[in-house]
Amino acid sequence: MSKAVVSTLYDSDVFRMACRQFDQAADAINLPEEIRDRTKYPRRCIAVSLPVRRDNGSVTVFEGYRVQHNISTGPSKGGIRFHEGVTLGEVAALAMWMSWKCSLVGLPYGGAKGGVIVNPRELSPTELEHLSRRYMQELIGFVGPQLDIAAPDVGTNEQIMAWMMDTYSNHVGYISPGVVTGKPISVGGSQGRREATGAGVAYLVGKYLEDLRIPVSQATVAIQGFGNVGSETALALSAMGARIIAISDYTGGIHNPAGIDVKKALAYIQYAGVLKDFDGGGAVTNEELLLLECTVLVPAALERVITKDNAPRLRCRVIAEGANGPTTNEADRIIEARGDIELIPDILCNSGGVIVSYFEWLQNLQSFYWSRDEVLAKLNGILDRAKESVEYQKRKFKFGRRLAALTLGIGRVAETKQKRGLFP
Ligand code: NAD
């Protein structure tokens, strides 16, 4: 059989990392050679130029991407990142992980991801609106409630989702809320979506601590990244009785062994914009935060922060991957060899976000809205089943937990492709 010619389009550390994870999982389940490449590589990518009128009258052209990794198992689904470090390879890796995640938790979606190379903090609200609307405008034809559904990710939020939904709706001529999830409640968002990812991380942390017989009230937690995922995880875990001893954002972190007042930290960020100089504890760098002694370490910022250099020095009992791809392949091997850390892999750990996005999409399609309690109860039910299936796979095949989760997610996508044929 001839091997596929693999282009260098996506080549990057993070894409190679996602590919290595795929290869290991495919080997572990003896995935037939003929199905591998078409399960592994993205279905298509769209690169767009985004001219934006600045407040001073000048025009800046930004570059954006959308990668649709898999559309065999349903419309593709995935967030949009606004960050200066975005690359096509990163977006492709994130799209790939979305495919495995949706498949693992049983959602009728493929995976996608989008990104724009921009530091959103350098744009005024008007410029940000122009950029968001232009990005959606350029993607019309490739997105839609039955085609590809966006959501927030790093650097994007509910307001940006509302602008994108509005741009799409104006184009089609009627309100089409199902094209984007993570919207404000007033424009078709779901109860519980804002907190869903963090609530899901906290729920799973609670379950794994229970398995370890560690009372949540005795757990200490260090969280890297205090945006949507990090702050909601902190709020939920502190409400469950855990002590949050460290938090951080891109400006650095705060460490307080006695416990940080999470609500006060959030109020400070609302006022100051960043965590820097918050007086709730001593200063700590993002690198130092990862090495703090704690029960639970939650990376909730960017990829590839737990590496071969710091993995041997981690001092936590549980790693809960709120972020996508925070642990490199080398670090994975070190953590597994150490044997003293339970790792809750990203595609399980942070799946609460896409699960409630799915609920939002369902509510939009039906124009029938659910209560917050209903949303959270359904979320927890899906997380319980996903955790159970991962633990069963882990025990049955003596896999590490990441490999167990990946083999389930990848196996189901590959099976659908095999059953449907070559086109999807
Ligand atoms: P966000 O933009 O709301 O927050 C990101 C946080 O990370 C901010 O506090 C930011 O200051 C911090 N940060 C940025 N660069 C950093 C750096 N170099 N070092 C340390 N901190 C840094 O984004 P988010 O939505 O919370 O996403 C965080 C992670 O969670 C990403 O990996 C994302 O893909 C993943 N995720 C998000 C969702 C969701 O629903 N938003 C769902 C699943 C997974």
Image (spheres, rainbow, N blue to C red):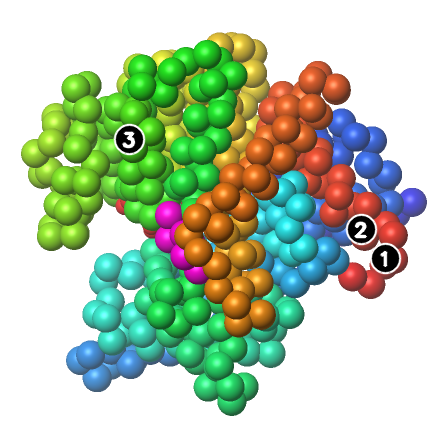
Q: Quadrant of the N terminus?
A: top right
Q: Which mark is residue 98?
A: none
Residue drawn 42% across the image and 52% down it: 372
C-alpha distance separating marks 1 and 3: 46 Å
Q: Are marks 1 and 2 in contact (CB under 8 Å)?
A: yes
- Disc 3, SS: helix
**Horizontally, is 186 left or right of 32 in the view?**
left
Q: Is residue 67 visible?
A: no
Q: Amino acid at mark 1?
A: Arg
C-alpha distance separating marks 2 and 3: 41 Å
Q: Which span is picked out in magenta?
A: 190-195
Q: Residue furthest bottom?
A: 173
Q: Which mark is residue 420?
A: 1
Q: Which residue is mark 3?
A: 238
**Horizontally, is 5 left or right of 357 in the view?**
right
Along the polypeptide, which appears first: circle 1 or circle 3? 3
Q: Which residue is mark 2?
A: 416
On whether residue 193 falls in the magenta region, the answer is yes
Residue 38, placed above or below residue 207: below
